[in-house]
Amino acid sequence: MKSSPPVQQATFGRLAVEVHRDRSELGRAAANACAEYIQSVITARGEARVIFACAPSQDEFLEALVRTGLDWPRVTAFHMDEYVGMPATSPQSFRRYLREHLLDRVPVGRFLDLDAENVDLAAECARYANLLDEKPIDLICLGIGENGHLAFNDPPVADFDDPVRVKTVELEDICRQQQVNDGWYPALDAVPRHALTLTLPVFRDARRLSVHVPGPRKAAAVRGTLHDAITTACPATLLRLHPAATLYLDTASAALAFSDSSA
């Protein structure tokens, strides 16, 4: 599966940035790079452990990834968040999204999911943290929220040095509105207020990050990610510190990326 070269490239801190012509080219480029890396990990160590984001921003990437011919039975898959109490069969469930876009289409070896219906949320967070910590995470495939969040680490709850790997959080209204903007819910009042999420140290400690951020609604968050001070006011600024992260943009999401003379 071929992809066109980026129309623009740059580095911000340690973060590599590629701008592609459109969402489809972004998805193919990221999928090719991820597939090559995952296969190299499988060749070297016999398996790969990968965390996937579940959002419309990942549609083109996942569509391309399932076509790459990876040795999927050697992949252990995780996801990064889920609404508290959300059944896995709900149309708004992130687990359902991942099943429809990936898990029902390729023979992944194992999928380890967050049980958001567990009445003991503290125990569930601890259980999932233990699964994450069994071995290093080889790759996280993620996006960036409109408020700069990674997973559901919104600015009010984000912590670069969070002492836990998984926690329950209250969602910021900007984050909840994004779920409306993405078409998951008809109105803000319908969006759940609490979720389980992987914390920022999980992203910091992963061996590689592949960040897929298309569309004009993400342009301001992308600019903040690349130019703001590295603080939890924009959690995604953490990406500039990671030694092996690539941010894939399309021309719409990159519209403000290079407008700061400090770049």
Image (cartoon, rainbow, N blue to C red):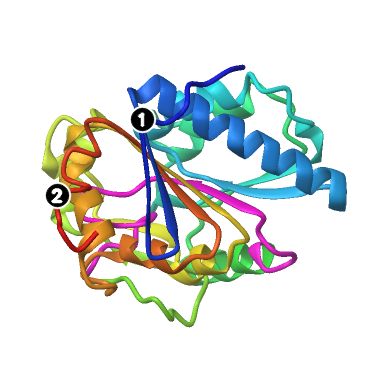
**Residue 153 within the magenta-colored segment of the rendering:** yes
Tell me the CA gap for discs 2 and 1: 16 Å
Q: Residues within 10 Å of mark 2 (few under 14, many from 20)?
A: few
Task: Give the amino acid type for the residue marked by disc 1 in the picture.
Answer: Val
Q: Which residue is mark 1?
A: 7
Which span of residues is magenta-colored?
132-155
Q: Which residue is mark 2?
A: 259
Q: SS class of the residue under badge 2?
A: loop
Position of 253 with respect to 20 (left or right) is: left
Q: Position of residue 32 (x, y in %)?
A: 60, 30
**Residue 77 within the magenta-colored segment of the rendering:** no
Q: SS class of the residue under badge 1?
A: loop
Q: Quadrant of the N terminus?
A: top right
The image quadrant that residue 170 belongs to is: bottom left
In depth, the one of 31 and 144 nearer the eye is 31
Q: Residue at x 51, y 57 (%)?
A: 118
Q: Which mark is residue 28?
A: none
Secondary structure character of the magenta stretch overall = loop
Position of 30 with respect to 35 (left or right) is: left
Residue 100 visible in image: no
Q: Position of residue 154 (x, y in %)?
A: 27, 62
Q: Quadrant of the C terminus?
A: bottom left
Q: Position of residue 135 (x, y in %)?
A: 74, 64
Q: Residue at x 74, y 66 (%)?
A: 134
Looking at the image, tell me whether mark 2 or mark 1 is earlier in sequence order.
1
Is 100 drawn above or below residue 258 in the view shown?
Answer: above
In depth, the one of 80 and 17 nearer the eye is 17
Q: Residue at x 58, y 18 (%)?
A: 2
